[in-house]
Amino acid sequence: MSHELGIELSVKRDDLSGLAAGGNKVRKLEYLVADAIKQGATVLITAGAIQSNHVLQTVAAARKSGLRAVAVLHGKAPEKPSGNFLFNTLLGAEIHYLDSDRFVEDVIGYMARCGDDLTKQGEKAYIVPVGGSNALGALGYVECARELAEQYRGAGQQPPEFLVTATGSVGTYAGLVAGCAYYWPETKIAGIVVTTNYFAQRENVVTLTNETAKLAGIPRTWTADDLNLKYDYVGPGYGIRSDAGNKAIDRLARAEGIFLDPTYTGKVFAGLIGEVEKGAIPKNSRVLFVHTGGSTALLAT
């Protein structure tokens, strides 16, 4: 792909993080599950789409940590289990369905009510936010920035000039922006936006980035003008395949044997290609693509 695109491309393989089918949420859950255990939780509650990578990784993290798991999924029960939904059933998640046009907003109250019901049953519930994306969870990607800096330094390589990652529930992007400000201050962090919901609105991205930096002890704040967010690659909408994303999936698979997913990484890699073609990422630049996982969605029916 470096040769095809005319850049020096590297990939951070967070799709190989080792829990369930892998993915970026494991870094966030390292902090969130530790907090849940510290609070004496017996069950994790979280929410997402039917094929949510976040839900799968949260359920797996719960089971690995000796906790029960409740998953609130958007929509109705699928006729046939497949992809991440199938894995959730194999892990023994208690699955609820919420069919709402305002799922992201409505599920907050729904999860709180689930927690109250579990409390009455003698359980101690811990609510993991959608995407694991609060300041505590985003610390996982401040730590990722430190890890990247250490890996590049150990390999005798210069830091990338551009880092490209997904912006969905924003925690990954916020953590990388804050962390790279400390460890790689010259690297430009491009967030390819994959959703149209309120998470990715600039003011909300700014808020989470600043909260994360404050929690990490990084003495900097950001405004909307400081953030390099790209809104041109969402396609028809969140969770809906785009032509450019499909082409990016095919292209990387055939060039490198690396699989992307249609909801996140396919669109993000399409964004990387698009930014190179537009000249926003100049030829011969050192570029790091953060692979956040999710290729099991290719198996969904």
Image (cartoon, rainbow, N blue to C red):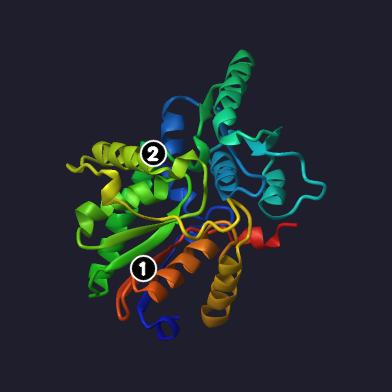
Residue 39 in percent (x, y) is at: 43, 25
Name which residue type carries label 2. Answer: Asn
Residue at 63% across, 44% down: 49
The x and y percentages for residue 171 are 41, 45
Image vertical order of residue 301 relative to residue 161, above or below: above
Which residue position holds label 2?
204
* 280 versus 141 height, above or below: below
Q: Inspect this view and state whether residue 158 appears.
A: yes
Left of 217 or right of it: where is 163? right
Q: Secondary structure at mark 1?
A: strand
Q: Is residue 45 left or right of residue 4?
A: right
Inspect this view and state whether residue 29 appears.
no
Task: Label 2: state its secondary structure.
Answer: helix
Q: Could you classify mark 2 by the number of other residues whose Cα lies within 10 Å: few (under 14), some (14-19), or many (20 or more)?
A: some
Query: Which label was assigned to residue 288?
Result: 1
Quarter the N terminus occupies: bottom left
* Residue 274 in the figure: left or right of residue 177: right
